[in-house]
Amino acid sequence: MIPVSTISLPAETEALVNEVLRSGMLAQGRVVARFEQEFATLTGVRHAIAVNNGTTALVAALQVLDLRPGDEVLTSPFTFVATLNAILDAGAVAVFADIRDDDFCLDPAAAAAAIGQRTKVLMPVHLYGQCADMDALAALAQTHRLDLVEDAAQAHLASIGDRKAGSFGLGCFSFYGTKNITTGEGGMITTDDDVLADRLRVLRNQGMRQRYEYEMAGHNYRLTDLQAALAIPQLARVDDMIATRRANAQYLIDGLGDVDGIQLPQQRPGRGHVWHQFTVMITDEAPMDREEFVTRLTERGVGSGIYYPKLVFDYSCYRDHPRVKVGDVPVAASVTDRVVSLPVHPGLSQRDRATIVAVVRELMKA
Ligand SMILES: Cc1ncc(COP(=O)(O)O)c(C=O)c1O
């Protein structure tokens, strides 16, 4: 079976982990600080603040923005549930605007139309490894004086123009086991704002600046040096990882470009896609529906994933939630019924890639 994602850690990881084990310091220490510094440099920002996962990164980013009861966060309905849970955890109201079907990200025109009196934060999601239209969305945030929080959980080092994901506002990253860069569990917040960076560092450590001197009601959001030790060797090879994902994506695009029944993912001009997922959409011309396609792929040894089978708010636990405001999002509703992600990770062999192309071609001919 060709898995839809794999974990492969560079050989030097073990030595660095052993160094941490012998150092006598397992909690947040020097290695976390090094991880933060290297990640900030790669992302092109002044500060990176490590936290224990990507959901925490989003919650913490919202917490330092001093939202008041009733304040709204405007985001995409086509995302992982953590985006919504983080908004609710931070005490805010979640509001949704539709996406575009060429990049699966917030549609700036729809976002503009959804901004209201109580909107305080614009939270685009850089889905599948491609940046949302940040030129338009950052301009929108500026016009309406909204804070910008980027859910960049899937988009480490994705770019738009000469800027990286996470360099426009408060960038929130995940290093969960399936992500392009992983620490098993882990997260990071990036920012150029010195004041917010300082608040995030204090917030993550129980609100404590000096030992037993508390200046805000904080939390324990800390990452461990053991986890940071997993990330550092990956950062040293991140260009190779991204280049391999891009080569794999191009191979699939070349091999599947003329196939009826699926619509291939698009890379918008000026955007550097890092291909966290390679997501196709089943069209009306396909000889089978999505569920059958996934079943047949599995039978032929090709792993796949449906990210995400429903819109984020379309679950009974959110249906009558007083802080979930559901709007009309027809593009997202259509996309969520049709997406299937195929393997694109750097662990694919040439044979794997050829198999994926051959199997998809064969199924779509049936
Ligand atoms: C879009 C998105 N947002 C947020 C998260 C949350 O990250 P984590 O699982 O590290 O909490 C994830 C990943 O899982 C994600 O894909």
Image (tube, helix red, strand yellow):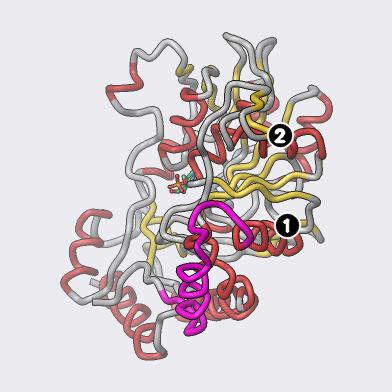
Q: How many marks?
A: 2
Label 2, on which residue?
A: 148
Q: Secondary structure at mark 1?
A: helix
Q: Residue furthest bottom?
A: 351
At 40% from the left and 62% from the top, the residue drawn is 262
x then y, percent, for residue 60 = 58, 33
Q: Which residues are magenta?
A: 8-30
- Foreground: 188 or 310? 188
> Going by the image, does 6 lie left or right of 50?
left
Q: Is residue 28 magenta?
A: yes
For the C terminus, the image quarter is: bottom left
- Foreground: 12 or 262? 12
- The tag earlier along the polypeptide, 1 or 2, is 1
Q: Is residue 194 magenta?
A: no
> Going by the image, does 358 lie left or right of 31?
left
Residue 290: assigned label: none
Label 1, on which residue?
A: 40
Quick check: is the Cβ at mark 2 less than 8 Å away from ligand 1? no
Quick check: is the Cβ at mark 1 less than 8 Å away from ligand 1? no
- Foreground: 60 or 213? 213
At 28% from the left and 69% from the top, the residue drawn is 303
Kindly identify the amino acid type of the residue bearing the numbered disc 1: Ala
